[in-house]
Image (spheres, rainbow, N blue to C red):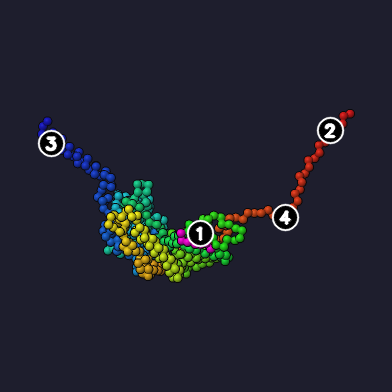
Amino acid sequence: MNAKTLYALIGAAVLALIAAWWINSTQKPASESPESTRVLLPGFRDQVNDVNTITFTGADSKVFATLKRGSNGWTIADKAGYPADVAKLREFLLKLADATVVEQKTSNPKRYGELGLSDVKEKDASGVLVTLDGPKQPVRLIVGNFNGGGGGGTFVRRDGEAQALLVKGNLSVDKTVAAWEKKDLADIPANRIRQVTLTNPDGKVLKVYKDQAGDANFKVADVPKGREVSSEFVANTLGAALAGLKADDALPAKDAAPEGKVYKANYVAFDGVSVDATAWAKDGKDYAQFSASLDNAAAAAYIDTDQARAKAEFESFAEAANKKPADEKPAGTTDAAGAKPAAEVPKPLAVSDPAKDKAERVKTLSDEVASLNKSFSGWTFVLPSYKFGSFDKSMDDMLKPIEKKPDAKDAKAPVKPAAKPAPKPEPAAKS
């Protein structure tokens, strides 16, 4: 082989290597490209806490929710300043801050609709324009479809840019203002409730109660003579109405006042906290308004009783700690091995300083009532139907059905004898 041929072969080999490298690099999965290693919104992670306004804009450029941060925290401008769901809001912002690009998609505007990334000016746009104000560089991002069937990820497009992107995770935006409202209203468990009084629109009253906080079931008061409750558990759902109480929506109270058949409910806790509810139904939705108060006398009596119990338990514990059998005491000691004298047993605040303990507990209850009224005041709430079912109960719902007795006239009517069968014809005489 001469030198010329050798050089030609080497040149061909080099060209082949270059071609192979080029083909391989152009066919790399997008996830291995530099695009995939960068975050969707560079620098935004350090400015999340600077966001003070979030605007969600849907099709036809209609804004469906504007969340603002002010002196009262995050509120919803479109709902007369009703509190926003801060946990949900923050989770969304952190998802945006941590979002990374998986791959580039189309930059052809004609294909944006397939990904939910059409300009929101269009009437049939299915995506949402998310605008974040506050950071040095405001964010404007169109969030499109969730690519659940394609292994996860969300299609997005930075507003003003042609390039569509697939980013990791689910950044889907709830498209109703109600979805961004604070839902939690109250959480008073049934074991705190002493009495529930329901007043129906016709004025009839149903009262259920517990004698002691530790009672397993609520009792029904004033059961009519000759009637029985359907079960020992029948009234328990009434006492749980304020446990995990959430709203589906909220409206200014002045725009949604009680009307039609109105139900009243009063919940009284053993510790003196009381909640009043007014509920009604309209156009297939269930509405309610609430207010809370504290009976200071009842709170004081409850705390006194609880302190007396705490003192008795402490004295019993201290006495037991100093009473071990003599054979457990080492020689030369007077106390049981390892036992502390009563004076050294730590005293709970209810025993060591009852006045301070009482003041702190009354303050805790007062703060709870203030917090409840902050959530309740000025608003009418749309409730889940299962919660409204705790307000419209009557005595009949608590009792066993009345057994139907036979009608008195039927009971006195003589019993008709059964009809006698027709006589059989006699056989004809033989001739």
Query: Quick one: label 2 or label 1, which is nearer the N terminus?
Result: 1
Query: Quick one: label 1 or label 4, which is nearer the N terminus?
Result: 1
The answer to whether any part of residue 117 appears in the image is no
Q: Is residue 103 in the magenta section?
A: no
The residue identified by callout 3 is 7
**Is 396 displayed left or right of 417 in the figure?**
left
User: Seen from this angle, which residue lies furthest right?
Assistant: 431
Which secondary structure lies at badge 4? helix
- Whole-angstrom CA distance, mark 1 to mark 4, is 41 Å
Q: Amino acid at mark 2?
A: Pro
In this rendered view, identify the residue nearer to me: 423 or 349: 349
How many C-alpha atoms fall within 10 Å of the one at disc 4: few (<14), some, or many (≥20)? few
Q: Residue at x 27, y 50 (%)?
A: 36
The residue identified by callout 1 is 218
Q: Amino acid at mark 4?
A: Lys
The residue identified by callout 4 is 409
Query: Quick one: label 1 or label 3, which is nearer the N terminus?
Result: 3
Q: Residue at x 84, y 33 (%)?
A: 427
